[in-house]
Image (cartoon, rainbow, N blue to C red):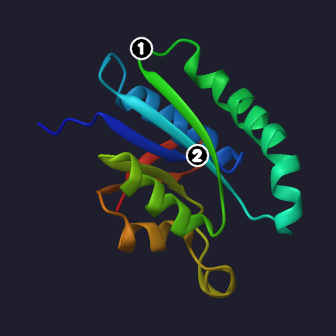
Amino acid sequence: MLRFNNVLIPVDYSDFSRKAIRACSTLFAGDERVAFHFVHVWRSPSDQSVGDALPDLQAELDEFVSEFTHAGDYTAHTRVLMGDPATAICDYAREMGCDVVAMATHGRTGLAHLLIGSTTEHVVRHAPCPVLTLRVSAEGAEPGA
């Protein structure tokens, strides 16, 4: 049986994030060893705004995840990262020794996928640990491939 102690869940404040967090909360329910690492990656428009914005960004992330962590039997860590989302997620997973990255896939295809790119796809290819992708539908999230 696989055991995960450190689960990294990227947050972009979308319904995709909410459903992925709920799915992970259910998947890891009752396992007190699990520590969730909720990260939000912010692309700063300029280096000057980083210092001023960081406290507000951290407060926003803490408030967002509090909806999911108040009833959990697990430890929750939150952190705002700066830079390219896919790279920052992989770097954080490596730095913190995460056992798995659990993230929603937005399901873009065709031209939208080509133009926007896929953060999830990059993380799957470059993360130092397994990546659990959650295909999010209107009904909820389910593990994907």
> Of residues 99 and 106, which is closer to you in this image?
99
Residue 138 seen in the current view:
no
**Residue 131, quarter of the rendered image:** bottom left
Residue name at image x 60 percent, y 62 percent: 106
Comparing marks 1 and 2, which lies closer to the viewer? 2
Q: Are marks 1 and 2 in contact (CB under 8 Å)?
A: no
Q: Is residue 111 left or right of residue 74?
A: right
Q: Amino acid at mark 1?
A: Asp
Label 1, secondary structure: give it.
Answer: loop
Residue name at image x 46 percent, y 61 percent: 91
Residue name at image x 53 percent, y 42 percent: 20
- 58 above or below 70? below
Percent across and percent down for residue 8 are 44, 45
Residue 85 seen in the current view:
yes
Which of the numbered marks, if any, corresponds to residue 114?
Answer: none
- 139 above or below 72? below
> Of residues 115 and 4, which is closer to you in this image?
4
**Image quarter hosting the N terminus:** top left
Q: In terms of sequence position, does the residue under pointer 1 or pointer 2 come before the other?
A: 2
Q: Amino acid at mark 2?
A: Val
For label 2, count other residues whose C-alpha is less than 10 Å away and answer few (under 14), some (14-19) or many (20+).
many
Task: Identify residue for label 1.
Answer: 73
Task: Identify residue for label 2.
Answer: 39
Label 2, secondary structure: give it.
Answer: strand
Percent across and percent down for residue 64 are 71, 32
